[in-house]
Image (cartoon, rainbow, N blue to C red):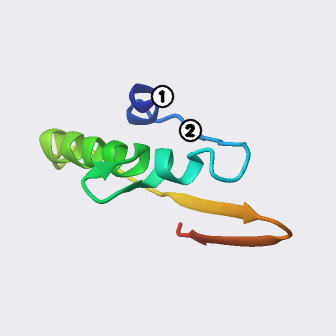
């Protein structure tokens, strides 16, 4: 998925499961145990720094949404 994102494709990750199954832990992590999002973000920005030039423009956006019970919580940036 990371290679596709770096190639310019839109990517989506989705987690579904019972409360306490580890969805948030897998995505965000806790303490020194990084989840998918911080690991992927680090990789993306490392690649951008390595390939940055006047001829290569990067546009990065990320949205995060959590549906819990009947409510919707999250952050979105564009």
- Residue shown at the point (58%, 69%) measured from the top left: 76
User: In the displayed structure, does residue 9 sit left or right of residue 37?
Assistant: right
Say how many tags the image has.
2
User: In the displayed structure, does residue 16 sit left or right of residue 44?
Assistant: right
- Residue shown at the point (42%, 43%) measured from the top left: 36
Among the two numbered marks 2 and 1 on one chain, the one whose residue lies closer to the N terminus: 1
Asked if residue 21 is positioned above or below residue 3 in the image, the reply reads below
Residue sitting nearer the eye, 31 or 63: 31
- Residue shown at the point (47%, 57%) measured from the top left: 61
Asked if residue 38 is positioned above or below residue 69 in the image, the reply reads above
Mark 1: few, some, or many residues within 10 Å (few <14, many ≥20)?
Answer: few
Residue 35: x and y, percent? 39, 47
Residue 42: x and y, percent? 26, 48
Q: How far apart are marks 2 and 1 (CA)?
A: 7 Å
Q: In which quarter of the image is residue 60?
A: bottom left
Residue 4: x and y, percent? 46, 27
Furthest-right residue in view?
A: 70
Mark 2: few, some, or many residues within 10 Å (few <14, many ≥20)?
Answer: few
**Residue corresponding to mark 1:** 1
Furthest-front residue in view?
A: 20
Instruction: Assess whether mark 1 and mark 2 are in contact (beta carbons under 8 angstroms).
Output: yes
Mark carried by residue 28: none
Q: What element carries label 2?
A: loop
Mark carried by residue 11: 2
User: In the displayed structure, does residue 27 sit left or right of residue 66?
Assistant: left
Residue sitting nearer the eye, 77 or 54: 77
- Residue shown at the point (48%, 51%) measured from the top left: 25
Asked if residue 70 is positioned above or below residue 14 in the image, the reply reads below
């Amino acid at each position: 998925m990371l290679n596709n994102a770096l190639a310019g494709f839109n990517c989506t990750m989705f987690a579904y499961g019972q409360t306490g199954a580890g969805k948030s832990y897998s995505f965000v992590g806790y303490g020194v145990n990084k989840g998918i999002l911080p690991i992927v973000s680090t990789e993306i920005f490392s690649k951008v720094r390595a390939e940055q030039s006047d001829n290569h423009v990067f546009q990065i956006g990320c949205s995060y949404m959590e549906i819990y019970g009947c409510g919707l919580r999250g952050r979105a940036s564009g």
